[in-house]
Image (spheres, grey):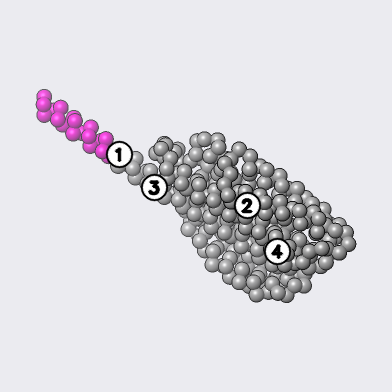
Amino acid sequence: MDTLLWGLGGGLLAVWGAGAVWRARRRAEAERAVAHSLLACRALLVLVAAFQQHRGMSSALLSGDGSFGGPLARKAREIDNVLPELKSVAEAESDAPHPCLTVNDLALFGHRWGRLRETLSSLSVEQSIAQHSALIAQLLQWLAALGEARVEPLFDERSARDVVRNYVSRLPALTECLGQARALGLSVAARGGCSAVARVRLMFLVARAENLLAQASNGVSRGRCADEAEAAVQAMAQMVKTRLLARAAVGVSVQEVFEVASRAVDGVFAWANETGDQLTQARQSSPGNGAATTAWAA
């Protein structure tokens, strides 16, 4: 009888031990997936910023400001250096039932980017902005999809999910709104006048930026980067409203537009990066890490 009990006890311990090892392995794999997804989000944010800068410089160059030729070429090389970082993301996602990004998607994106570089000198400012914006929209779509499918399910609290949405959706959308305003503003300043079409578009972009800023600030804790970004966005909005929308001569230089607008865009990216750091720290310190990991891995 004792032998039987010892045998049963040993069997139960073996099963429990195997289960513990399996759970630990599952948690470790899930945590690696989480870290991979957050790194993918960061790489996408870097690319969004680089494409936005390339778009703005292209607008100024095509509008007649040749000083942007060198910086534009350097920015293109920077993009070429970062794009390969998405390959491992695409390969991992291709094995998922509902991939956020596939290898074929990335290859098509690379082809479209190469085509834009080849034909840029023959494009109008409007065509350049449209083609750049289409590529940026694709990056933002991948970022939002990764955030919704791979990051947001890790957090149970609504406030935490709001932070995730800021990181992968609201703040990136705000940078794009500001980036489009920067590109158009550079064109207006280089030409020395604001057409009716450009005026309407700039007014829309400023209003949209102010709305996105309010959404991102609502219901989440604000740090130093958020406060600095808000001030920079407000300064850019003021510049556009008072100095770029004039019906006569534009009262601001190309360089000043670039500096003020870039300060706003960079400020929002700094806010987004700070938010990403908060998410990483929250995952590492959460007492419910195991339960959240189980939900993520399921």
Residue where numbered disc 2 is placed? 228
**Kind of element beneath mark 4:** helix
Considering only order in the chain, which callout, 4 or 3, is on the residue closer to the N terminus? 3
Residue 123 lies in quadrant: bottom right
Q: Amino acid at mark 4?
A: Phe
- Label annotation for residue 258: 4
**Kind of element beneath mark 1:** helix
Considering every residue shown, the one lying at the far top of the view is 1
Asked if disc 4 and disc 1 are in contact, CB closer than 8 Å, the reply is no
Residue where numbered disc 1 is placed? 20
Considering only order in the chain, which callout, 2 or 4, is on the residue closer to the N terminus? 2
Considering only order in the chain, which callout, 1 or 3, is on the residue closer to the N terminus? 1
* Magenta stretch contains residue 105: no
> Residue, x 46% and y 46% (percent of image)?
281
Residue 53 lies in quadrant: bottom right
Considering only order in the chain, which callout, 3 or 2, is on the residue closer to the N terminus? 3
> Residue, x 47% and y 43% (percent of image)?
282
Q: Amino acid at mark 2?
A: Glu
Q: Position of residue 16 (x, y in %)?
A: 27, 35
Q: Is residue 237 left or right of residue 215?
A: right
